Amino acid sequence: MQERTHSNRKNHEKPGPPEIRSIAVGIDCSPHSLASLKTAADLASRMHAELLGIFVEDINLLRLTELPFCQEIRQYSPQPEKIESTELERMLRSQARQAEASLQREAEIFRVRHSFSVRRGNVPKEVLAAALQADLLVLGRSGRSPTCRKGLGSTARSALAGNLKSILLMHAGYAAENEAVLVLCDGSDASKAALAIAIRMLRTGNTLHILLLPQYEGHEHLLESELSGQLPPGILRVEYHVLPHVSDSRILARYIRMADSGLLVLSDRMNLPAETVHNLINDIDYPILLVRT
């Protein structure tokens, strides 16, 4: 991989990024979802967007209480006990109150308009339905289930397979103010939209990494010149990385890890196969913003 660094000091006009007027966030009180909530509130403040909190009462969990063999093993009880539907309903209401309180707290800190909704049904389906009118959906990479600690959770997978505009997949421990941003660019309109959003995600002093995916020999020089015109004068440090056009997500993941940035921004509507992009998102353990226009 070739790498070049330059300071951008030219005052160019750049195309405006896709408008983000509302940001939806799924909240289930897991560490990943709470990290998502904080990031969503921060973005809503910076983009003057409304924050929409979503909590879903899992209908599949409630249906389990109807099964005669469904029992709960408690830490301090020698005997398993039947799970009562009334107790589960109480627990879900308590979790919803915690989720709303978390949303209220972050909204007050970042001073953003916000709303909260509670839905009941299949979690991925209900989250996506509630987020249909939002411009950006923020989710934790994984949910509460221990089986989802690696890779994507069920809601994140459903969002990836759907047609929402843009999705930000977060995990606990990400600190935007300390992290660089890396964006994949192949010259397509979709990748230019991703770059425009990546620029808005940058904090003062952070480095913007641009991974160029040229489509033919010599294209990287034209591509770098074209993209430089999209950068605002406030970005003093940009690092260009050049990777010949590939369709293997494992090769892409290797170079992204070498760049070691914090947030990865890309689109599944570039010249890369969508399957390659989705495999990359599933395999690489970075916060990822998937831009769709």
Image: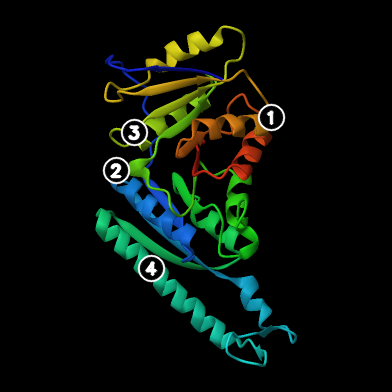
Residue ID for mark 1: 248
Circles 3 and 4, Cβ within 8 Å, touching? The answer is no
- Give the residue type that dot 4 points to: Glu
Q: Check if mark 1's residue and mark 4's residue have beta carbons within 8 Å.
A: no
Q: Looking at the image, which residue is at 46% across and 35% down?
A: 261
Q: Would residue 275 appear left or right of 97 to someone viewing this image?
A: right
The residue labelled by disc 2 is 46
Instruction: Using the image, determine if residue 201 lies above or below residue 139.
Output: above
Q: Are marks 2 and 4 in contact (CB under 8 Å)?
A: no
The number of callouts visible is 4
Between the residue at mark 2 and the residue at mark 1, the CA separation in whole angstroms equals 35 Å
Whole-percent x, y for residue 65 in the image: 66, 83
Characterize the local packing of mark 4: few (<14), some (14-19) or many (20 or more) Cα atoms within 10 angstroms: many
Q: Amino acid at mark 3?
A: Asn
- First in sequence, mark 2 or 1: give its number: 2
Nearer the camera: disc 2 or disc 1: 1
Q: What's the residue at 50%, 76% (across, down)?
A: 92
For the point 35% across and 69% down, the residue is 101
Label number found at residue 100: 4
Residue 206: numbered disc: 3
Vertical comparison of 185 with 141: above or below: above
What is the CA distance from the residue labelled 3 to the residue labelled 4? Answer: 32 Å
Decide: few, some or many residues near mark 3? Use Cα within 10 Å; few <14, some 14-19, many ≥20: some
